[in-house]
Image (spheres, grey):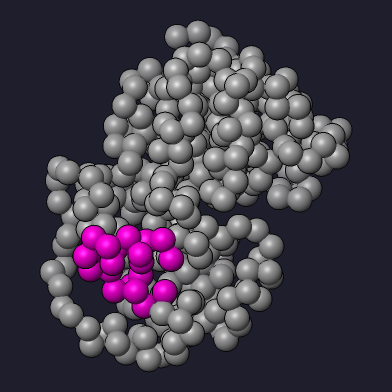
Amino acid sequence: MQDVYTVSVLGGGSFGTAIANIIAANGHKTYLWMRDHDRAEQCQQTRENSEYLPGYQLDSRLNVTADLEECVSHSDIVVISIPSGSFREVTRLARPLIKKNAIVVSTTKGIESSGFYLMSQILEQELTDVKIGVLSGPNFAKEIIQHQYTGSVIASEHQDVVDIVSRVFSSGTFRVYSSKDRYGVELGGALKNIYAIVTGMAVALGCGHVTIAMLLTRSLAEMGRFARELGADSLTFLGLAGVGDLILTCTSNLSRNYRVGYAVGTGKALEDALAEIGQTAEGVNTVKLVKAKADELGVYMPLVQGLYAILWESQDIKEVVQGLMSGELSSDVDIQGGV
């Protein structure tokens, strides 16, 4: 294992910026790539990502650029932090530039609309001769860059990917744990966005702590049941990438998905709620995809079904809630070991 790595983080959003800043501060040669040349140049000069992380000074060693070839062609590790809708496009742009045997890590918590593909599956389809990993966990970029204590999970079937990423990405306040269940870790990051919308909506409706506690535990049961049907280990959902991320995004207004749910719960139209936030809320797209896949597989997911009815079928929130409370009873614990 070498001492210093060259790392490119593709995506100038809040999390991509925060993780690139950690890696640069750790002494590795680090690039942060943005599509917009003017914005990249401004960030490089001002040492601040004023659009996504205003007021936070970037490490002087972080190179911000719009030149994809400059950064990717020399990188040992390529991190892709792009919203799911553009993930495949950016992967294809980077493909001819990525070195053989490079490590490619996804941090995107979403599902591609066509084909129900997770981001690491897109990497498998688009790239050859690379080692793939997934980084996910209860992470808010604003708190990471403030040096709040937090943890994340690197998942890969390659032990050297786990070892290298854990060392390169970890800092005194950001700890990276390991997992071999790449699919489970990735599903946890995607699915929890749905339930953040649900809990935001519940809070807006005036629900108390006991209701939120019930929602969180039933959400975890749904996540584990669905993931197991897709071949993941539902025990993964008891870790940081599962229950940890679920608790964070379902209890904080720093979560974009929570804020969408809260806005809809106060009576705003979905389109207005999304426009107000001004950033991608992956859960809105994810609920449609998961609902369709759950129907196809016959997986019982009443919270997903209810949220879909509210967001996409314009059903009354209170009627949907009453239907959920009078619906089919199921067992309390659905987490099981193995796949």
Q: In this view, does 12 lie to the left or right of 259?
A: right
Image location of residue 298, percent across then percent down: 21, 65
Image location of residue 107, percent across then percent down: 50, 40
Can residue 147 be seen here? no
Q: Is residue 280 left or right of residue 238?
A: right
Q: Is residue 262 above or below residue 57?
A: below
Q: Is residue 314 above or below residue 14?
A: below
Q: Does the magenta stretch include residue 119?
A: no
Question: Residue drawn at (29%, 74%), measured in percent from left and top?
Answer: 302
Looking at this rendering, what residue extends furthest in the front direction?
114
> What is the magenta range?
288-308
Q: Is residue 58 left or right of residue 317?
A: right
Image quadrant assignment for residue 225: bottom left
Image location of residue 317, percent across then percent down: 44, 86
Task: Give whichever of 230, 324 is nearer the camera.
Answer: 230
Q: Is residue 302 magenta?
A: yes
Question: Residue drawn at (51%, 44%), measured in percent from left and top?
Answer: 108
What secondary structure is the magenta-colored segment mainly? helix
Image location of residue 36, percent across then percent down: 78, 41
